[in-house]
Image: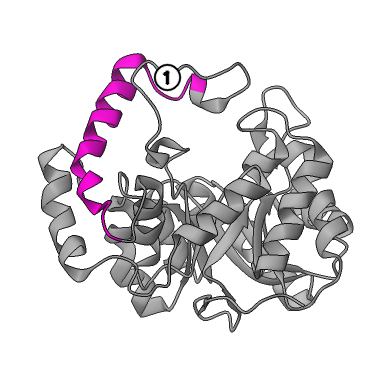
Amino acid sequence: MRHPVRARPLGKTGLVVSEMSLGTWGLSGDGYGSVDRSDAEKVVARALDIGFTLFETADSYAGGHMELSLGTVLGKKTDVFVATKVGVDRTTTPPRKRFEAAYLREAVGRSLKRLKRERVDLCLLHNPSLDCLTAGEAIATLEAMKSEGSIAHWGVATGDSETARTAIDKAAEVVEVAYNLLHSIDLHRIAGDVMVARCGVLARSTLNYGMLAGMWTKDRVFPEGDHREGRWTRLDLERRLSQMDGVRFLVKGDVLTLRAAALRYVLSNHIVSSAVVGPRTVPQLEQLVRETGAGPRYLSDEDLAALPRALQKVGIQT
C-alpha cells in the first residue's frame, strides 16, 4: 500500500494528485545520457511506493520506451495518473512537430497500448506553436478524443507565457510551464488567467536542469549526450551561476541545501498543482522528497517577500 502524501487539486479536472510528480525525460536517457531500463523502472516503482500519483512523460521519450516502462510498473492502477505529451515525430531526421488530427489520433492510440490504459489521463500538446492553437485542428481533435473517451483531460506543455495564455483561453485544463527560482516570469505572467480559469499547472524544470542543486562550478563540463552541453555558452553558464548568489540566503534553518530551497520555492506557490521532478536514481528521488520538509509552509513569508528584490539585484526578472 502506498503511503499518504501531500496532494493538490489538478485545476478543474477533478483529479487530486501528489504535489510532486515524476518527470521521466531524464529517466528515458534522452536528456542526460543513457539509463538502464531496469534502473529507470526502479525509480518509477519507488516513486509509486513513496506516494507519487502523477507521472509525466512523452510519447517521444526513448522512442516510446519510457511509456512502455510506465505501463509495466503502473499497469492499470486507477489511483495513479499519467500525463503524456504528443506531437513530436522522431521517425524523421530531424524530428518534426506534428499536430494534425490524423497524427494525434495515431499517437494517442500508440500511447494507450504502451501505457496499458484504456484512456490517457492527461494528454498534453508537446510545445505547439501559437498558430497551432489558434488556426490548427489540434484542440478540436483533443476535444473530440475526450468526448470519445480515449483521453480524460487535455492541456498544453509550452515554453512561453503567450502560448500558455492562449491555451488557457482555448479551455486547456492544464498547462505545463518552466518554473524555478531563476525563471519564474512565465508563470507569474499568467497567474491571473490560471486562477480565473481554474486551470491546473504542472511546474517543470524546477531545478533548472540541475543548476539549482547548487553543486556546479564555473568550469563545469557536460559529457557528450547531455543536452546541457550545448544549452549554454561558457559565458552564459558563468553568468547564471553567479546569479545564484542572489538566492543562497534561503539556505538556513531546516532548508539545508539550495536544492531544497529551489523545490520548496516551487511548492510555495499555491497555483502550482504539481512540481515535476526528474531524479535519475532512487537515492536522488528520496533526497528530493526528504528535503521538502514538513511543509507547508515551505519557505518563510519573510524570505518569499525578500526574493523579488534579491533576484532583481542579480539581473533576474520576476
Label 1: few (<14), some (14–19) or many (≥20) C-alpha neighbours in 10 Å: few
In the image shown, does 84 or 233 lie closer to the viewer? 233
Left or right: residue 14 compared with residue 275? right
Q: Which residue is drawn at 62% across and 67% down?
A: 154
In the image shown, does 115 or 244 lie closer to the viewer? 244
Quarter holding the N terminus?
bottom right
Viewer can see residue 98: no
In the image shown, does 91 or 211 lie closer to the viewer? 211
Q: Quadrant of residue 15?
A: bottom right
Residue 305 lies, with reference to residue 85, above or below; the image says below
Residue 98 lies, with reference to residue 83, above or below; the image says above
Which is the main secondary structure of the residues drawn in magenta? helix
Helix, strand or loop at mark 1: loop
Viewer can see residue 175: yes
Residue 227 lies, with reference to residue 177, above or below; the image says above
In the picture of the structure, the residue carrying the numbered disc 1 is: 220
x, y percent for residue 11: 49, 77
Residue 100 lies, with reference to residue 139, above or below; the image says above
> Which region is colored magenta?
229-253
x, y percent for residue 83: 66, 61
Amino acid bearing label 1: Arg
Q: In which quarter of the image is residue 236?
A: top left
x, y percent for residue 189: 28, 59
In the image shown, does 195 or 129 lie closer to the viewer? 195
Q: Quadrant of residue 147?
A: bottom right
Which colour assignment does the render follow? one colour
Left or right: residue 234 compared with residue 292? left
Q: Does the magenta stretch include residue 241?
A: yes
Kindly give the residue lying farthest to the front in the view shown: 253
